[in-house]
Amino acid sequence: MGKKTPKPPKIFHVNWFRRDQDNEFLWPGFGENLRVLEWVLDRCDGKGEAETTPIGFVPAKDSIDLAGLDLSEETMTKVLEVNAEDWKAELGDHKEFFKKFGDNLPNELKEQLKALEDRLTAVPA
């Protein structure tokens, strides 16, 4: 698509369902998702601040409006955390999924998967 589309869409991934050690959701809920979507729109406009991680960019600590939320700094750190070991475990599932496409899988996707694996491997355990 990137070769055929001069301005391909930006892709964002959000995991609203991360849980803490007590199995409680870290993010306060559906009604607060607009805060993250506001950051997404800011990123699309080149304004939203982000941190670089092995899986891509995540919001910088203070880039999401948390006014009025009872969300500790520790919780927000966990919300934004990228755990390389968890992602390495996911790679196997990604590889299995990609196998379904056989020779029809574009090389660019294979290259991206390999690059992700390399970035995750470079993270100290």
Image (spheres, rainbow, N blue to C red):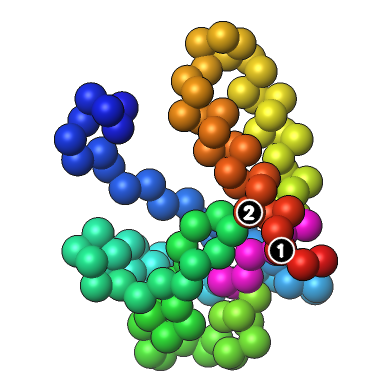
> Would you place residue 86 above or below residue 48 in this image?
above
Q: Is residue 34 visible?
A: no
At 73% across and 72% down in the image, what residue appears?
20
Q: Which residue is mark 2?
A: 119
At 38% across and 80% down in the image, what residue appears?
63
Residue 83 is inside the magenta segment: yes
Local secondary structure at mark 1: loop
Q: Which residue is mark 1?
A: 123
In the rendered image, residue 105, in percent from the top left (x then y), is placed at 52, 17
At 56% across and 29% down in the image, what residue appears?
110
Q: Which mark is residue 96?
A: none
Q: Quadrant of the N terminus?
A: top left
> Would you place residue 29 above or below residue 102 in this image?
below
> Would you place residue 1 above or below residue 76 in this image?
above
Q: Residues within 10 Å of mark 2 (few under 14, many from 20)?
A: some
> Would you place residue 100 above or below residue 7 in this image?
above
Q: CA distance from mark 2 to mark 1?
A: 7 Å
Which residues are the magenta region? 79-85
Local secondary structure at mark 2: helix
